[in-house]
Image: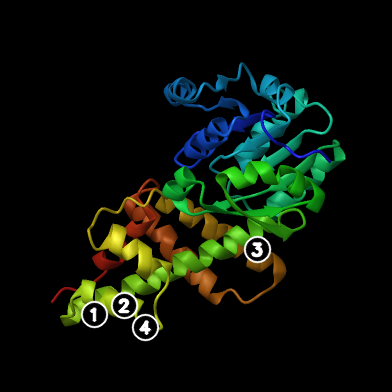
């Protein structure tokens, strides 16, 4: 398999908080990038800033690409743009040998089925979700968890390396499984650290001093080392990752645990907590605003 190196043609679908900087890095690296997004203003701005080409249709995007990347909110949207029945879709325009890379966060159970369906049509699918947020996306410092055929992942590695550090997780859907488990842990430390700081503050401890001590002790985590100093303590709550997306990823984690018959008490409890926070604060609240939700549950004097 030939490696996908510049000036190879890449189709990129989805220019949201993460997709925009990821696609911009590919354009800056010399790839011929064709893009599309539901937001016409965002699409126009991106093309003006990067010299990328706006796709005339999904089919045309597929036909012009050596590799197609989807970066969309959820799996139903991914399936729709790739295989949408009765209308314009990517697969209808693909030439043989084109790679399909889904970098969205999707249900690993659903991804396994979609990968098999695409394989039956003769196309190699890779699921390659990312972790790191919009700031690391802009810096090309994402963690990329790629599931799928090893040779295909290696062929696409030059593309991945523009956006971050590549990890091959195993067969189809393993990338999405790894992302679900990672975000389960990330959400867990956010919830646990928030409860600890809220409880300590109610007792009279200084939250900043608490976080400093936690970071010098065994309770430290990415949440205490990064999210609290940058987004929670200053009350900016702008990490760039929606609360609703974290809640969605936790539902994927619940589905995965249920499908595998593994212990799920903590996953279920955490998922329910984030679902309630999303209902209270809204989908587009920052995921660090879970702190505000938990703080709102504090008993009054």
For residue 200, which numbered disc appears in the image? 1
* Residue 151 locus on image (x, y percent): 81, 49
- Residue ID at (71%, 69%): 260
Q: CA distance from mark 2 to mark 4?
A: 14 Å
Q: Along the line of sight, which residue is nearer the eye, 143 or 238?
A: 143
Quick one: 167 or 72, which is closer to the camera? 167
Q: Residue at x 85, y 36 (%)?
A: 121
Dots 3, 4 in contact, CB < 8 A:
no
Question: Regarding mark 3 in the picture, which secondary structure is present there?
Answer: helix
Relative vertical location of residue 230 with respect to residue 205 in this rendering, above or below: above
Q: Residue at x 39, y 76 (%)?
A: 220
Whichever of callouts 3 and 1 sits on the residue coming sooner in the sequence is 1
Where's residue 242, x and y in %? 41, 49
**Residue mark closest to the camera, 3 vs 4:** 4
On screen, residue 31 versus residue 135, left or right, reads: right
| Quarter of the figure with residue 201 | bottom left
- Residue 51 visible within the image: yes
Q: Which mark is residue 217?
A: 4
> How much space separates mark 3 and mark 1, taking CA atoms?
34 Å
Measure the C-alpha gap from mark 1 to mark 4: 16 Å
Q: Residue 87 location in percent, x, y?
A: 69, 22
Structure colour scheme:
rainbow
Which one is in front in this view, the residue at disc 2 or the one at disc 4?
4
Q: Are marks 1 and 2 in contact (CB under 8 Å)?
A: yes
Q: Earlier in the sequence, mark 3 or mark 4?
A: 4
- Identify residue for label 3: 256
Neighbours of disc 2 within 10 Å: few (<14), some (14-19), many (20+) = some
Specify whether residue 103 is in view.
Answer: no
């Amino acid at each position: 398999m030939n490696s996908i190196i510049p000036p190879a043609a890449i189709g990129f679908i989805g220019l949201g908080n993460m997709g925009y900087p990821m696609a911009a890095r590919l354009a800056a690296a010399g790839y011929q990038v064709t893009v599309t997004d539901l937001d016409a203003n965002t699409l126009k701005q991106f093309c003006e800033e990067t010299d990328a080409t706006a796709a005339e249709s999904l089919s045309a995007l597929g036909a012009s690409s050596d590799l197609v990347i989807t970066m969309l909110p959820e799996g139903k949207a991914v399936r729709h743009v790739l295989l949408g029945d009765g209308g314009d879709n990517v697969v209808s325009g693909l030439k043989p040998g084109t790679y399909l890379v889904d970098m969205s966060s999707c249900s690993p159970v659903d991804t396994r089925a979609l990968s098999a369906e695409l394989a039956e049509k003769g196309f190699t699918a890779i699921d390659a979700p990312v972790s790191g947020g919009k700031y690391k996306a802009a810096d090309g410092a994402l963690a990329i968890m790629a599931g799928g055929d090893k040779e295909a992942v290696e062929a696409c590695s030059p593309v991945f390396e523009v956006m971050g550090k590549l990890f091959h997780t195993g067969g189809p859907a393993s990338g999405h499984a790894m992302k679900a488990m990672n975000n389960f842990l990330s959400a867990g430390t956010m919830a646990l650290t928030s409860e600890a700081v809220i409880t300590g503050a109610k007792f009279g401890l200084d939250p900043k001093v608490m976080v400093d001590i936690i970071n010098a002790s065994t309770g430290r985590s990415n949440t205490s080392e990064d999210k609290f100093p940058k987004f929670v303590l200053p009350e900016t709550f702008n990490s760039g990752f929606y609360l609703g997306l974290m809640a969605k990823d936790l539902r994927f984690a619940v589905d995965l645990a249920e499908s595998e018959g593994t212990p799920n008490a903590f996953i279920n409890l955490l998922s329910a907590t984030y679902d309630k926070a999303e209902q209270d604060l809204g989908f587009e609240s920052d995921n660090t605003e879970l702190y505000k939700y938990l703080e709102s549950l504090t008993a009054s004097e």
